């Protein structure tokens, strides 16, 4: 097996295709002699006049267009329709030589497939070798499957190795044959799909990626072209916020009426200022935290109306924030310098109370696996807990600001984003211990992470909001302004279709909405009578936006549709007691109060 070793210097190994044709099997010949019958089908035909074009702009070649449609028909299972189109148009999907080649691959006629490959008429020697490698590799695998170890070894030694292609892979195959049994080797490769009944079809797909598209039309090419066209239309749509998918029948366009700007509901169950709100990940619930020491779970019904599901009592101080578990089955509530409570969303039961003697909690977050939570403490420590309340890890932070207690955990569970100083945010990778900083020129009041985890929205003391790319950098990529902030913590959020918009509260009792890409202010929503502290955009319904205010209410904003009527939840006059005429917060719901006796 020593013949498989590679003793060439690196400079030569880099030219993997520079193998003398004399070392190749007899079926490979790249002479300038006349091609076998049928090979010309794969090459451009001699010009016989102006090429036929279709379409109003004259940029679509008819032959390519018909071939792509034919390919699509066959891919969709319309075999007869595809054959009829080939016959009527006189434009074949594949040349006779290519059709023979495909049949030989499907039948596992490997040696003849390699011979036919050389007759297709490809001018690029590297493409032929790469395609032959894929074919012979499949042959190698199937010989092993049939326990023909000697045949597999011969194929590797005398057919695959002389190609000079993918030498790293050749060495892997060689090493495995030395150290593994044939069954162990084949079992290893079966994990890659080699042992499936469709492996030869997968081989054809791989060959299509290697061979020129003029020889074999790529899979799903028509679908790809249509998706590109729709994507261009969507990206060009300034107000794109459509709930429905894009139609092929008409060009896409969204009007400003797609932006949630009309009050659909006013939720009045809280008895004091509402400081924080957040939609669940599945968009079926909204959680709110208030200065009245309670949190409320609101349920979005089938008609898009929000009704209180559970009123969560038990905190001794104001509830400053909430956090949904990744599966939306549990909710964390954090009191001001008090405890963190974990609730069951379905029953409203308090499952656990997290506390440390003499130290208060000021913020909370979930890890993506839903098995641990992160907490911020008044002594500037950060602690990780398991769900049963066992402290997993704890470390001292460098937070020196009382303006915000925000922190969040990245999508991978490794990145922790927290305040470092008044004007600095720390991006800390728990795995690599790498630290990166976002440095602003003024005090940071709050921040929020985008759904994809790549961008951070930072609210500043000077009435500006900055957008940072934290995947590459961090780099500041945009700025939003116009809202008012002088005394309180104001929170903003990403939202809309593809999170293409930015929304924020404001001390002038309004909600502000900007276009994320351009930074243009596109809507100002009036309705509240006090500072708007927090906003949350439904992650599933881009037409639903919620805002929380010092006026004790939560407003639900929707797209402007004449058929929708405003509904107030709390009482007919939307009074501060949050009671319906029947005396219940929810006619068929429950009010749950944590008694403080849950397991700690």
Image: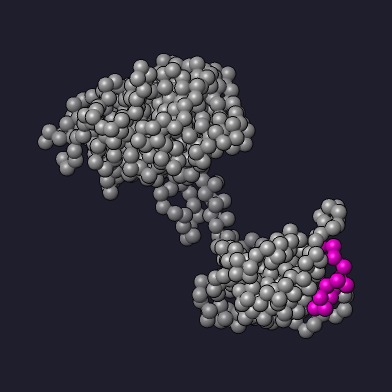
Q: Is residue 279 left or right of residue 568?
A: right
| Residue 24 included in the magenta stretch of the image | yes
| Residue 283 included in the magenta stretch of the image | no
Point out the image quarter for the N terminus.
bottom right
Q: Is residue 407 left or right of residue 343?
A: right
Given residues 67 and 29, the one toward you in this image is: 29
**Residue 364 position by quadrant:** top left
Measuring from the top left, give residue 593's x and y in whole percent: 21, 31
Name the residue: 16% across, 40% down.
587
**Looking at the image, can residue 287 be seen?**
no
Q: Which residues are magenta?
A: 17-30
Q: Is residue 125 left or right of residue 449?
A: right
Given residues 350 and 499, the one toward you in this image is: 350
Measuring from the top left, give residue 460's x and y in whole percent: 50, 22
Give the answer, above or below, for where 87 lies relative to 362.
below
Given residues 547 and 539, the one toward you in this image is: 539
**Residue 215 position by quadrant:** bottom right
């Amino acid at each position: 097996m020593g013949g498989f070793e590679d003793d060439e210097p690196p400079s030569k190994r880099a030219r993997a295709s520079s193998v003398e044709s004399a070392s190749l099997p007899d079926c490979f010949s790249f002479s300038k002699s006349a091609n076998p019958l049928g090979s010309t089908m794969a090459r451009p035909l001699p010009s016989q006049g102006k090429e036929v074009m279709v379409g109003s702009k004259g940029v679509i070649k008819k032959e390519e267009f018909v071939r792509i449609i034919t390919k699509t028909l066959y891919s969709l299972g319309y075999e007869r329709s595809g054959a009829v189109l080939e016959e009527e148009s006189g434009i074949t999907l594949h040349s006779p030589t290519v059709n023979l080649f495909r049949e030989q691959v499907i039948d596992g006629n490997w040696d003849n497939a390699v011979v036919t490959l050389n007759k297709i008429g490809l001018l690029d020697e590297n493409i032929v070798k790469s395609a032959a490698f894929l074919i012979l590799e499949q042959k190698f695998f199937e010989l092993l499957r049939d326990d023909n170890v000697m045949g597999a070894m011969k194929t590797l030694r005398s057919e695959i190795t002389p190609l000079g292609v993918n030498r790293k892979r050749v060495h892997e195959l060689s090493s495995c044959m030395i150290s593994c049994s044939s069954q162990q080797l084949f079992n290893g490769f079966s994990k890659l799909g080699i042992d499936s009944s469709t492996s030869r079809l997968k081989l054809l797909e791989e060959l299509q990626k290697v061979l020129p598209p003029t020889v074999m039309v790529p899979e799903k090419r028509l679908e790809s072209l249509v998706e590109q066209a729709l994507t261009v239309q969507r990206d060009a749509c300034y107000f794109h916020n459509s709930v429905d998918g894009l139609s092929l029948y008409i060009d896409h366009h969204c009007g400003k009426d797609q932006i949630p700007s009309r009050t659909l509901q006013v939720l009045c169950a809280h008895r004091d200022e509402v400081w924080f709100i957040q939609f669940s990940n599945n968009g079926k619930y909204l959680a709110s935290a208030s200065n009245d020491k309670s949190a409320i779970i609101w349920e979005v019904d089938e008609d898009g109306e929000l009704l209180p599901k559970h009123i969560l009592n038990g905190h001794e101080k104001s509830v400053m924030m909430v956090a949904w578990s990744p599966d939306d089955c549990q909710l964390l509530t954090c009191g001001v310098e008090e405890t963190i409570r974990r609730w069951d969303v379905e029953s409203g039961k308090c499952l656990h109370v997290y506390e440390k003697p003499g130290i208060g909690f000021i913020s909370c977050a979930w890890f993506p696996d839903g098995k641990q939570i992160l907490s911020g403490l008044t002594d500037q420590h950060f602690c990780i807990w398991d769900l049963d309340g066992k402290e997993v890890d704890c470390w001292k932070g460098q937070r020196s600001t009382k303006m915000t207690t925000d922190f969040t955990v990245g999508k991978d569970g490794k990145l922790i984003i927290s305040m470092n100083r008044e004007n600095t945010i720390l991006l800390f990778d728990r795995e690599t211990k790498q630290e990166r900083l976002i440095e602003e020129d003024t005090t940071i009041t709050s921040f929020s992470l985008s759904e994809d985890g790549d961008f951070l929205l930072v609210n500043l003391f000077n009435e500006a909001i900055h957008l940072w790319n934290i995947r590459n950098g961090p780099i500041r990529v945009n700025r939003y302004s116009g809202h008012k902030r002088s005394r309180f913590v104001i929170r903003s959020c990403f939202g809309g279709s593809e999170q293409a918009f930015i929304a924020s509260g404001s001390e002038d009792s309004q909600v502000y909405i900007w276009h994320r890409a351009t930074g243009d202010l596109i809507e100002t929503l009036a309705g509240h009578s006090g500072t708007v502290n927090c906003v949350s955009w439904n992650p599933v319904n881009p037409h639903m936006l919620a805002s929380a205010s010092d006026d004790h209410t939560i407003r639900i904003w929707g797209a402007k549709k004449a058929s929708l009527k405003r509904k107030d939840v709390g009482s007919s006059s939307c009074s501060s007691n949050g009671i319906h005429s029947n005396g219940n917060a929810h006619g068929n719901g429950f009010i749950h109060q944590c008694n403080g006796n849950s397991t700690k």
